[in-house]
Image: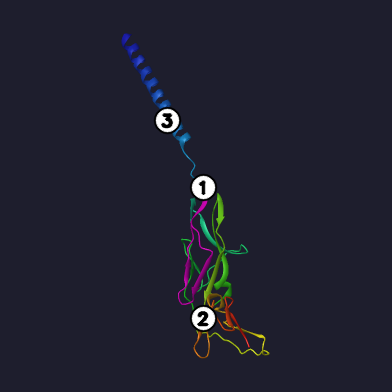
Amino acid sequence: MTLDRGRQAASTMFALSAMLLLSGFNCLNGAHAATKVDDSKGPVFLKEPTNRIDFSNSTGAVVECSATGNPPPEMIWIRSDGTAVGEVPGLRQILSNGNLVFPPFRAEDYRQDVHAQVYACMAKNQFGSVISRDVNVRAVVNQYYEAQVYDVFVIKGNTALFKCQIPSFVADHVEIIEWVTTDGQTYGLDDSFGRRQSFPQNQNFHRV
């Protein structure tokens, strides 16, 4: 009888120990679950593109844009009206890392809707989205051009206004630095000589 009681007591102690161990495991497991942090978050830019990109058709350009988030955000390029930008074979590419690429192109392949456009970079996931500043992209076709100055006829004693005519396809990218007379004399934008004066607006007047 004493032996049976001893076995019963041992069995009871084993059962109690097992219950305590299981209870401790559940307690620890619950504490671990309670301390788990939700690290999901909306997109944040790591590299935002500059607001202006000028490039030559002989060089091309890469507009960089990258963002982080959890889950990793999708990178999309859009126009100023909010519509998504797609790839144009040989003229515009969108890389998997989010960069917008304009490969070198021939002069005859210039397209205003591609090479003279306002873009923006957007990163989005299920927790939100961010949009970059506007990016003004301008491609310049590398080709020969000439500046022209045309004759002006005025009555003696009045002012003649000469304008330096630059072709429109390069006008935004050319700076007039001086005027040169037919006899080789040069005048900077801030120079004055006698009755001749140069102006920063790429114009020149001469009183006759």
Magenta residues, as a range? 40-66
In the picture of the structure, the residue carrying the numbered disc 2 is: 107
The Cα–Cα distance between marks 1 and 3, rounded to whole angstroms, is 28 Å
Q: Are marks 1 and 3 in contact (CB under 8 Å)?
A: no
In the picture of the structure, the residue carrying the numbered disc 3 is: 28
Q: How is the image coloured?
A: rainbow
Q: At x 53% / y 67%, what residue is drawn?
A: 52
Determine crowd level at label 2: few under 14, some 14-19, many 20+ residues with C-alpha closer than 10 A. Answer: few
Dot 1 or dot 3: first in sequence order is 3
Q: Position of residue 84 (x, y in %)?
A: 58, 64
Q: Position of residue 71 (x, y in %)?
A: 49, 50
**Left or right of residue 7: residue 43:** right
Closer to viewer: mark 2 or mark 1: 2
**Left or right of residue 21: residue 179:** right
Question: What's under tag 1, amino acid-wise?
Answer: Lys
Q: At x 52% / y 52%, what residue is drawn?
A: 43
